[in-house]
Image (cartoon, rainbow, N blue to C red):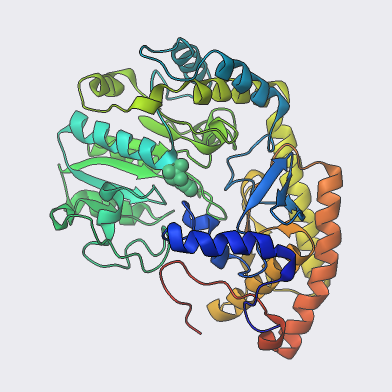
């Protein structure tokens, strides 16, 4: 098979994908759903249905999913309890001319479980929640500059970071994003600081003294965990400079603890944003925070028809209650720890320069090669061979409660088959012969 030729096992999926490439620019709505980022020609672009930790593609192949809808499906696909709550709601209608009281019921629940939450607003996704939080922070402080660390969605306020140099977002998001379409007037309004580097945050705050509205950050991401004192230092610097602290909990929320990263690490922001795991796969987002800060949202133009949709509200309530009832945080940690243990044991046995890092609830596979091109080959080969074995995987792993012993056993068995292949490729360096499916960067072609 030549490079990136299509595998006949996914022919139906790719026939639809060809149509999509004509009709849907980019082929998918979320960049992480582009098959070109995984094993092009082998990764199925389309799903027919999902249940628990599995999904079935259009050609009828089953995959055990280690990504779980970029982390959103924390209980597993088509969860019976959440879906029953949603179906019951749908029978009564989903969006009306007036609000549904589930808005208040969910707000009460969020205020109960999230340490910084005294008031709540809703929306439909993570990027939206971040845009709302930044708008609130700018309005509350009367300042314009935002300091950020991490990924915060697709909106103008954030992509403005790349206006002065298109490399600013490289280590926070994807390399090579051009901020085309973002007004040049926003240049200098969104500036980065480095994770676990209080000096870089302090430098930005001092350089823009009295102008910083907020610091928005992911408290943890993948392998990046806060060093002792880092988050506390960020909190202190925010207070000293009169800037609001926003935790983007779109990934960490309802995954690291019911109260998210702020509960896990014991540092309380002024505002926090949620999406993904809050609703187990139904469209939902939320901004929560200090009442005095949130209050201003009532006077701002922050408003959208579907933010009142009762499906997302019902799904969120059911998800949060199920997370609590099923003792989710023990289950997620156990599943992640078992994955990490098998991965590391097998990698060590075969002398692979790969390891499973991060918290068990947020596993990231790291590389010790020190050579980005070689790591890329290892990753592509790993993804290709796991996909062939019916495991949908990348270097980020999102466990869910449906990853039980049977599923983790399947993963371990597949890793046992794939590890010797990776070893042989490292020894022979014959990647060209082995890699039938090379991934392609979304915005920048791979170098090397
Ligand atoms: C930390 C973080 N913030 C915001 C977003 C954007 O969320 P959404 O894709 O729901 O707009 C993401 C998505 O991956 C994220 O990981």
Horizontally, residue 88 falls left or right of residue 32, namely right
Percent position (x, y) of residue 439? Answer: 57, 72
Percent position (x, y) of residue 30? Answer: 48, 52
Residue in view at x 55 percent, y 33 percent: 282
Percent position (x, y) of residue 100? Answer: 44, 12
Total marks shown come to 0
Look at the picture and state if 445 lies above or below 231: below
Comparing 296 with 340, the one in front is 296
Residue in view at x 69 percent, y 51 percent: 66
Comparing 157 with 423, the one in front is 157
Task: Dividing the image into four quarters, tell me where ligand 1 lies.
Answer: top left
Percent position (x, y) of residue 10? Answer: 70, 63
Which quadrant holds residue 288? top left
Horizontally, residue 228 falls left or right of residue 164, namely right
Quick check: can you spot residue 365?
Answer: no
Residue in view at x 64 percent, y 37 percent: 74
Which quadrant holds residue 241? top left
Look at the picture and state if 59 lies above or below 388: above
Which quadrant holds residue 393? bottom right
Quadrant containing the N terminus is: bottom right
Look at the picture and state if 414 lies above or below 55: below
Residue in view at x 33 percent, y 55 percent: 193
Horizontally, residue 12 falls left or right of residue 246, namely right
Quick check: can you spot residue 210?
Answer: yes
């Amino acid at each position: 098979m030549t490079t990136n030729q299509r595998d006949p096992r996914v022919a139906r999926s790719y026939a639809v994908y060809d149509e999509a490439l004509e009709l849907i620019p980019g082929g998918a709505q979320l960049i992480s759903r582009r098959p070109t980022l995984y094993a092009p020609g082998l990764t199925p672009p389309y799903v027919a249905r999902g249940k628990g930790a599995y999904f079935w593609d259009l050609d009828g192949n089953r995959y055990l999913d280690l990504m779980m809808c970029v982390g959103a499906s924390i209980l597993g696909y088509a969860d019976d309890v959440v879906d029953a709550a949603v179906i019951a709601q749908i029978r009564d209608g989903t969006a009306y001319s007036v609000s549904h009281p589930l808005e208040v019921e969910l707000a009460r629940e969020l205020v109960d479980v999230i340490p910084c939450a005294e008031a709540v607003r809703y929306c439909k996704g993570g990027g939206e929640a971040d845009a709302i939080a930044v708008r609130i922070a700018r309005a509350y402080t009367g300042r314009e500059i935002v300091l950020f660390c991490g990924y915060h969605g697709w909106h103008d306020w954030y992509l403005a970071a790349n206006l002065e140099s298109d490399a600013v977002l490289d280590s926070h998001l994807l390399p090579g994003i051009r901020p085309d379409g973002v007004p040049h007037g926003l240049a200098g309004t969104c500036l980065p600081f480095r994770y676990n580097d209080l000096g870089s945050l302090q430098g930005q705050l001092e350089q823009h003294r009295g102008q910083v509205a907020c610091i928005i950050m992911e408290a943890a991401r993948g392998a990046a965990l806060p060093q002792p004192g880092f988050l506390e230092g960020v909190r202190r610097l925010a207070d000293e400079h009169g800037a609001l602290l926003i935790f983007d909990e779109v990934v960490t929320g309802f995954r690291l603890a019911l109260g998210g990263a702020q509960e896990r690490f014991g540092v309380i922001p002024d505002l926090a944003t949620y999406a993904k795991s809050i609703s187990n796969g139904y469209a939902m987002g939320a901004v929560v925070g200090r009442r005095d800060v949130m209050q201003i949202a009532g006077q701002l133009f922050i408003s959208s028809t579907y933010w009142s949709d009762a499906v997302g509200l019902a799904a969120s309530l059911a998800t949060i209650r199920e997370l609590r009832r099923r003792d989710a945080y023990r289950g997620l940690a156990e599943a992640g720890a078992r994955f990490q243990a098998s991965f590391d044991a097998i990698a060590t046995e075969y002398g692979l320069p790969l390891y499973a890092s991060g918290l068990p609830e947020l596993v990231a596979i790291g590389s010790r090669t020190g050579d980005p091109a070689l790591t890329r080959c290892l990753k592509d080969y790993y993804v290709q061979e796991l996909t062939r074995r019916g495991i949908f995987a990348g270097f980020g792993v999102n466990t869910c409660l449906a990853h039980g012993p049977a599923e983790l056993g399947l993963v371990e068995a597949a890793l046992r088959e794939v590890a010797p292949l990776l070893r042989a490729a490292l020894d022979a360096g014959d990647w060209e012969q082995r890699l039938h499916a090379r991934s392609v960067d979304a915005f920048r072609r791979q170098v090397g």
